[in-house]
Amino acid sequence: MGSAQNYELPCKLNNPDLLHNLSFVHGEWRKSKSGKTFEVVDPGTGKAWTECPTNDASDVDEAVQSSQNCFEEYRKISPRARAQMLFKWDSLIRENKEDIATILVYETGKPRAEAYGEIDYSTGFTWWFAGEAERIQGSVFTPALPDRRVFTIKQPLGVAAALVPWNFPIAMILRKAGAALAAGCTMIVKPSPETPITILTLAYLADKAGFPKGALNVLTTDLDKTPELSEALCRHELVKKVSFTGSTRVGKLVARICSDNLKKVTLELGGNCPVLIFDDANIDQAMSQIFALKYRHAGQACITANRIYVQSGIFDNFLERWNAETQKIVVGHGSEKETTMGPVTTPRGIEKALALVSDAKSKGAKIHTGGHKVSGKGGYFFEPTVITGVTPDMDIASEEIFAPLCSFLKFETEEEVVKAANDTSMGLASYCFTKNVDRLWRLFENLEAGMIGLNTGNSSAAESPFGGIKQSGYGKESGKDVAVAEYLISKTGTFTLEGQS
Ligand SMILES: O=CCCC(=O)O
């Protein structure tokens, strides 16, 4: 581990070499120019266990130059060699799964089983994009003029920057870096201040996998310097592409800054995802799918269930079952075996949950279970909370919750619920449960979201295009062709052929 002297990861790793807390630039572990650092906190105790460099705008140019120098060579490496490095990276991540899960638990707070789940999900991306590297294709057209030939080629667009969130730090970085490195681009990652260490571990393993120096650089920073560092990356003339996952508010800022130089941008932004459960649904299926979706990482996923609409015929039964299951949740530190739900990752998460509960109560909502910060524990624990009587004027119905708060709304008809579900500026994911095939198809067509779960609460996968519409952003990550295309330029060649009559 780098320079931290007064901190320690509260448990041992099988492979201590995985742990790094300095920035990674051009194959070297580096301090920031200012020498300043910030603390990384275990959300399960509220205590710092390491520190990382606070990079600022003055650290950006060197990292970008490294990425650019690397790009000039990396772009010439054959797609098969890029695929082999991605496969090697993938194997190393899988081999070190147990240790990476440990770091993930102490950074995000999520229970160990969920940390394993995130790593399995994430290696789907390294595996998938290794395959995609060799499937980048141009095209040949049949031209209108007999002596003309027209074709396109695809080329990597250059240095890409990834601004990633703390809720799924491994998945978010492998989804972005996997696509970029497959395309032949190099990438600079700015991790979230809460979760830099898992990303530094991935950078260490990328180096071991044989990626050249500068292919994957990581610049850490704290909350205060995040805007400055991110803006410097977005404005640097050698950065040709920015991929951001985070809030709609910040996504708009990123888009605005990047528009000054017409940079390509992918935005995976906030969600306010509705779930529609009809009287004819398989209730067991809907319960288990939405329960897992809602409480995944204590409700801190952009695609989580924000508003749960249940049809009146099954509302009471469904609510009773949901309440009973919720009361069985064991809230605790992610490293403890019996824990089924960890803390929220930041103290801001607790404040937001309290404010949402208080606003809902003041406007007439009823709290059936929970509603408070867990008392008597260090760390950022919030009770799993069940709320009914939610109305559209409540913040909980219009804002992304990002906490274990389940808000239930009753509906009567398909027409009414589709209108209500779509009545949001967001359009990331929607979910519906019904055994009526015609209705399922109508819902697929009529719900306004980039991803629709049809009798499922789990639609994230390497092979499935991930991305929203409306104010949930644009561009796709993962999926065939579309994700790598975000890191490619297309050139059209037009050729006049002589001697062909
Ligand atoms: O929170 C956003 C990402 C969640 C996912 O990839 O399933």
Image (cartoon, rainbow, N blue to C red):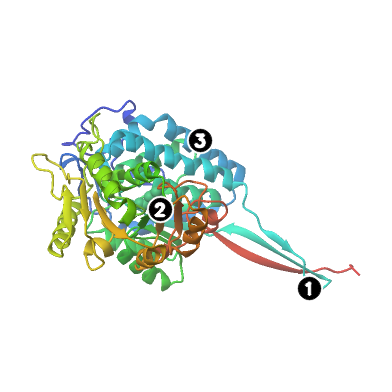
Q: Residues within 10 Å of mark 3 (few under 14, many from 20)?
A: many
**How far, Cα to Cα, is label 2 from label 3?**
20 Å
Q: Nearer the viewer, residue 321 or 152?
A: 321
Q: Nearer the viewer, residue 188 or 105?
A: 105
Kindly state the secondary structure of the residue where label 3 is placed: helix
Amino acid identity at mark 2? Ile
Residue 324, image x and y in percent? 23, 40
For the point 47% across and 64% down, which residue is it?
Answer: 446
Kindly state the secondary structure of the residue where label 1 is placed: loop
Amino acid identity at mark 1? Ala
Q: Can see residue 31?
A: no
Earlier residue among tags 2 and 3? 3
For the point 48% across and 41% down, which residue is it?
Answer: 124
Amino acid identity at mark 3? Lys
Label ID, residue 88: 3
The mark lying in front, picked from 3 and 1, is 1
What residue does disc 2 label? 188
Q: Residues within 10 Å of mark 2 (few under 14, many from 20)?
A: many
What residue does disc 1 label? 144
Furthest-front residue in this view: 313
Residue 71, image x and y in percent? 51, 53
Position of 449 with respect to 345 (left or right) is: right
Q: Are marks 3 and 1 in contact (CB under 8 Å)?
A: no
Position of 210 with respect to 41 (left or right) is: right
For the point 45% across and 39% down, which residue is it?
Answer: 123
Is the CB–ligand 1 distance for label 2 below 8 Å? Answer: no
Kindly state the secondary structure of the residue where label 2 is placed: strand
Q: Are marks 2 and 3 in contact (CB under 8 Å)?
A: no
Q: Nearer the viewer, residue 229 or 327?
A: 327
Residue 133, image x and y in percent? 58, 47
The mark lying in front, picked from 2 and 3, is 3
